Image (tube, helix red, strand yellow):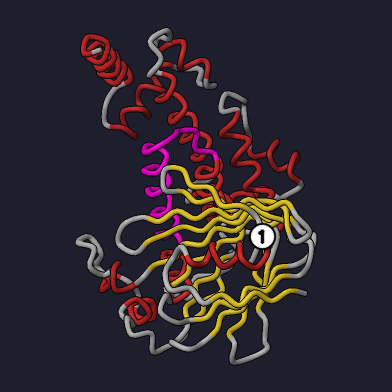
Amino acid sequence: MKEIIITPENAKDLINQIQEAIGGTIDEKWNEYSLTLDNENARGTIKFMPFDWGVNLLNLNIVFFKEIIFNIQASKFNPIRFMYNYKGHFKHRFGINNDEKLVEQYHSLIFTNKTGGANHIHFPKDKQLETSIIQIVRKKFLKKRTTNASLLNERLYEVFVDTDHDNRFAHYGLLNLKMADYIKKMNHIKSKGMVKVLKIESMVYEILSLHIQQHNKFQRGVQLPTSLTNTELKVIRKLGNKIIKDPSFNYSLEQLSMDSGLSQAKLQDGFKFLYTRTVTEYVRHIRLEAARDLMKNADLNVSQVVYSIGFTSRSYFSKIFKEKYNVTPNEYRKNVLNNLVIEENAA
C-alpha cells in the first residue's frame, strides 16, 4: 500500500503532487493537463482542466498496481468535491476516523473538509477505475453572476456558503445512471481546441446539476424504487441505450420483458425512474429525436424519415412531432434547409 500526502495550494497542485509521488509525464494542450502513467505504480491517465469561477475537472482513467491512498490535506485549497464513479470502486473517509465508506460503480460522493482536516481516497489494486471529480472553490464560485446558492436545499446551501471552511461534509449518493450517460458523452467529445473545452465545460455544469438534484431527492426522502435492484436498473439502462442505437426496431413491452428477464411491471417502474417515461413514451421520444436529427440531412424527405425510424403513419408522426416541438415536420425541414442555404452563401 502506498499513501500519497497531497497538500495543494491551488487546483493544479493536485496533479503536480501526484506526479511527484508516482511518476509519469504531464502534457498541456488547450488548457487540459494530462498526467500519463505507465510504470510500476500505475497505467493510465489523470487529466485536469480548469474553468472560470473556481470550477475545475479532474478525470482518472487508470489502473493502480498497488493500493493507493490519496491523503488530501484541507489547507489553502479546500474545494467542495463532486465525485462520480463511472467504473470500478474506491473508499473514502475523513482523517478523524477509520470508517471507510465504499463508493461503488455508478455511485457518487460529495465531500469537503474543515481547514486542517484530511480526506482519504483509497483506490484498490489492479482494478480499472474511471472517476470524475468536479472541484468548486466556493469564494470564487459564489461571485458568479448566475450562481444563486439560495436555490440549493438547506444542507447544501450551508456547505456552499461555508467559505471559511469551518465544517466537514460528506454525502454518499445512490445509484445514478443518468450521470453515467453524461460522463459517457463527455468522454466521447470529438471536437478539438476551444470548441472541445467549451463542450466539456457545459457538460461539467450538467453533471454538477445532477449531483445537486440527487442530493435534493435525498433530502426529500426519495429513494430508488423498491421493486428494483441496482443490477436490474443497469439492465434497464442497457435497454434504453439499445433503443437509442436502433430506434426503428418494433419494440414491444412483452418482447423487452422476455429479452431482459424482467417483468413488465419492473420495466415500467425502471423506465419511469430512469427516464420519467413509460416504455412506450420513451420509444416514441427517442424516435422523434432521431427524426429531428435525420431531417437535418437534405437528402431525405419527410416520408423517408418517417419510415426509416419505425413509424408506419406519416399523419400520426406529424401530429406527435408538432405536439413535441410546436412545429410541423415540413416547417422544421424548411427552416433547416433555409439555414443550410444561408450558411453555404455565407461561405
* Residue 203 point in image, percent of width and height: 42, 49
Dot 1: what SS?
Answer: loop
**Position of 237 compared to 327: left or right?**
right
The residue closer to the viewer here, 166 or 266, is 166
* Residue 239 point in image, percent of width and height: 64, 41
**For the C terminus, which image quadrant?**
top left
The residue closer to the viewer here, 65 or 309, is 65
Q: Which quadrant of the figure has residue 65?
A: bottom right
Q: Is residue 213 magenta?
A: no
Q: Residue furthest bottom?
A: 96
**Position of 100 compared to 330: left or right?**
right
**Position of 263 compared to 315: left or right?**
right
How dense is the environment of label 1, judged by Cα within 10 Å: few (below 14), some, or many (20 and up)? some
Numbered circles on residues, count: 1
The residue closer to the viewer here, 222 or 61, is 61
* Residue 284 point in image, percent of width and height: 48, 33
| Residue under the point 56% across and 80% down | 119
Q: Is residue 194 magenta?
A: yes
Name above or below for residue 197 compared with residue 192: below
| Residue under the point 71% across and 50% down | 263
Q: Is residue 266 visible?
A: no
Q: Is residue 258 visible?
A: yes
Highlighted magenta segment, given as a residue range: 188-210
Amino acid type at image mark 1 = Gly
Location of mark 1 (residue)? 23
For the stretch drawn in magenta, the main secondary structure is: helix
* Residue 207 point in image, percent of width and height: 45, 56
**Position of 19 compared to 190: left or right?**
right
**For the N terminus, which image quadrant?**
bottom right
